[in-house]
Amino acid sequence: MMATRAAALPSGAEWSYEVKWDGYRAQAAKNGDAVLLASRNLKDITRQFPSVAAAVSRLDAATALVDGEIVALDASGRPSFQALHHWSVEGLSLVYYAFDLLHLNGRDLTRRPLDERRAALRDVVDDSGVLLSDALPGTPSQIADAVQELGLEGVVAKKRRSTYAPGRRSDAWVKVRFAQHQELVIGGYKPSAAAFDSLIVGYYDGAKLLCAGKVRNGFTPAARAQIFVALHDLETPRCPFANLPSSRSSHWGEGITAEEMSALRWVKPKLVAEVSFAEWTRDGSLRHAAFIGLRDDKPARDVRRE
């Protein structure tokens, strides 16, 4: 179940509020001694996160299916999406925040109200090492102020009586991001002497992949090298973007002209990047975009402009 995007938190007694964690969405299944972690696109990531799997194995249940977020915390305890790729580095820790319980000991709970599922989850998680992403106290404005002050990504509002709708983006869950982040598909790059100077990124509008501009900043040397290897394997002679070339470069340089096209390399639109930015320009490009990390938990075809 996925949340819809909103500019402000809804209010009313029927709503509750949780932190929007900046990590990998994952469901955790426990069946006796066996544990499976699955990403949003159903990729088996159990071996990738052994400490999370170990915590799930200690859940107080014979069988359970939990929904949550795998989060890397830096030395100050703040979530860091970039750290998910380097979580074994000293000073970083990996945790699993559980926010929903879908099945428990043979019972399907997806048709039960959220408050009931949360109550059951609290008992299941107790002393396991899995952390509970519980409802936040306060009014929507108080919660928004506190979450922004802590530098967290955002808040998810959920209707207390809502059931769980697998595979659907529902308006019973509403997410508000306080930072400007966007998942974008990598469709090309501008080569440099050693690797690449910038990535060309975009999003899907129906069946069309639309270019949103270039991403030049935010790459560590290790990330640049890793991405360059993946790009090389995906190279294709055809530009995947339906709206290129642009008629002209914008004042901020986000456009891609016909003259620039000859210097670019194109790749099959398979890789998804998380990108921060200052704003969308009037012509639909990102301004001051910076790379945060690759998202191997998001299918490229699901990427839409938020």
Image: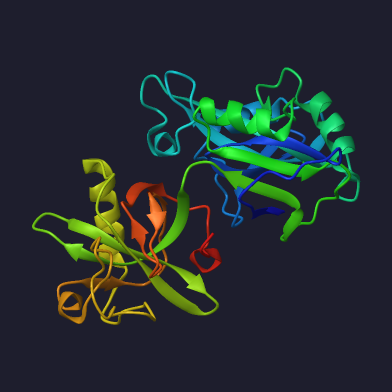
Q: Position of residue 64 (x, y in %)?
A: 79, 38
On screen, residue 151 versus residue 197, left or right, reads right
On screen, residue 253 versus residue 123, left or right, reads left
Quarter of the view holding residue 256? bottom left
> Seen from this angle, which residue lies furthest left?
193
* Residue at point 90%, 51% (across, down): 111
On screen, residue 113 versus residue 270, left or right, reads right
Front-lying residue, 216 or 226: 216
Front-lying residue, 17 or 61: 17
Quarter of the view holding residue 154? top right
Colouring scheme applied when the structure was drawn: rainbow
* Residue at point 38%, 49% (across, down): 278
Q: Is residue 12 above or below residue 289?
A: above
Q: Position of residue 47 (x, y in %)?
A: 52, 40
Q: Is residue 219 above or below residue 182?
A: above
Q: Is residue 77 above or below residue 281?
A: above
Looking at the rendered image, the quarter that the C terminus falls into is bottom right
* Residue at point 73%, 49% (across, down): 173
On screen, residue 87 versus residue 134, left or right, reads left
